[in-house]
Image: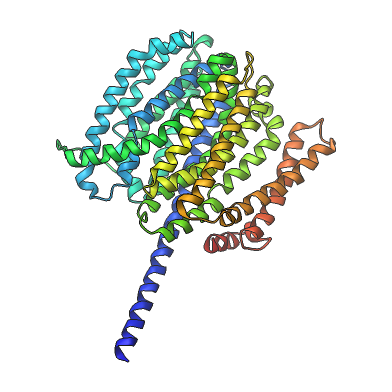
Amino acid sequence: MGSGRRETCESSGRRTKQRIVLSQLKRTAVTGYLWQILGQVGQRGVALLAIMILARFVSKEDLGVYGVAISVITFIEMLRLGGVLQAFIAHPGDEEDAKDTVFWIALLLGVGYTAILFLGAPAVASLFKSPDLLPILRVLSLTQLIDSFRLVPHALLLRRYRFREKSICDSVPVFIGAAAAVVSLAFLPEDKRVWCLVLMFLCRSLSAVVITHLFLPHWPRATFDKAIGRTLAWNGFKILMSNFPSGTLEQFLRPVVGLRAGMAAAGVFNLAYSTTTPAGMVSHAANWTLFPILARHAEQAEKLRDYLLRALKMVPLPAVALLTWLILTAPDLIPLAFSERWAPAAAPAQWLSLAIILRSYTYVSINSMLAAGRASPAIFIWWATLLLAVALFLKWPLAEGDATTPARIVAVFYGFSCLLSLILDSVTFGLRPVAIARALLPTAVSCGAAAAAASAVWASGLLDAWPLLRLLVVTVVYTLTFLPICGKMMGGTWRSLFHPRGFKELLRVN
């Protein structure tokens, strides 16, 4: 009897402890998600505000050149990191033993890729037939070396779930860069104003290193562990095999548009893409929050399945809601925000919003696979999508100055990646298709109903003469339709999203 009672008590104690751990883990995930959203939306929102100001002073061609340069720089940055960042975050060993090795790997890669960019800039400028691209690429190549000093403290902030500090380190540098760019307008001649955009990127990179080290300084020792280096390099390579095609898809859209439709089209496409970025980064922020948490539970299949279904239900929801609103309002919003000469960016922004909605679900699936150590399906998804994208961009005819057709192509191949990732979720994690569909339903119904209600305002034609008023009315109708339906579909009441207590209750039940 006594033994039975002890076993019962021990079992009960274990269950209680598991509930406490799960509660703490959930609280960490939610808190981290909110901080990441704040940081990413702040970061991208300020960048978008800066572009709204600067777009009134720079030409479409200049914005196209800058967009191509940033795409090349960001692509090289992905190669430089080579999966090392994520491999270090997920590293099961002692971080104290690994961090110095990671620093020297990062510094070596920073020096190497700075040299590659600097020396390869003439070839890139010649490819795009743009002499202005050469000095911009050479100046921005320095950011590869600068950013290598940030990798270790940045990864440690994520490993230790210090999402608040990570959010500050991401967002404050953007404020500094945007301020420097706007101030520099007063000193630059009209034909050199593209350099205010370059200054914005440089100042952001420098200040990010300084601020990250203020929160978590790292002074490396002259030590290098070859075994840890080999392990991180191999794990990083596997992650890179997934990141490479996805990074190629994201970063070479603007250069391809510039090559096939001209720099003016690339400028329009760049501005349209910039309008969608803040909303798209909402789900990206959640993925960064979930990755270290999922990586710690890679061997617990049941928990991983549960976390994935919750992630599919919750993570893309804010981004999908914002991007659906942008699809509805882009024809009014873009001319009002950027001036009438950027009105051609409205249609590309609508197609890109749809593309990023679909990409959000792909990212959730891919990050779950990588965190669980199942890189093969993630690699397959991105490489298959990249091959489709290349085929579409090669075969689909593009006219000079046309930015809308490339945006449609993006929506097509991200739709393919979304469908493929959901199918492989079912296979990889043993999830029933019905369970996945049930996880997607609340977002689809909430956003669909809100879009239908707001579209009725457009269809009425009553506010055609007042685009600003129509924008406000559509926004109000969309919001007041979305919030109650979403609250109900997520397991709460019609009023759950109208007050903090109801919002907390939804987080608890989901």
The C terminus lies in quadrant:
bottom right
Residue 212 visible in this rendered orientation of the protein: no
In the rendered image, the residue lying farthest to the left is 222
Left or right: 366 in relation to 55: left
Residue 307: x and y in percent read: 47, 56
Residue 225: x and y in percent read: 16, 40
Residue 31: x and y in percent read: 45, 54
Residue 146: x and y in percent read: 31, 27
Between 419 and 402, the residue placed more toward the observer is: 419
Residue for point 40% across, 52% down: 294
Residue for point 58% across, 30% down: 410
Left or right: 15 in relation to 182: left
Between 464 and 227, the residue placed more toward the observer is: 227
Left or right: 232 in relation to 143: left
- When the figure is inspected, residue 339 is found, relative to residue 470, above or below; the finding is above
Q: Quadrant of residue 98?
A: top left
- When the figure is inspected, residue 239 is found, relative to residue 407, above or below; the finding is below
Between 217 and 128, the residue placed more toward the observer is: 128
Q: How is the image coloured?
A: rainbow
Residue for point 43% across, 22% down: 72
Q: Quadrant of residue 150?
A: top left
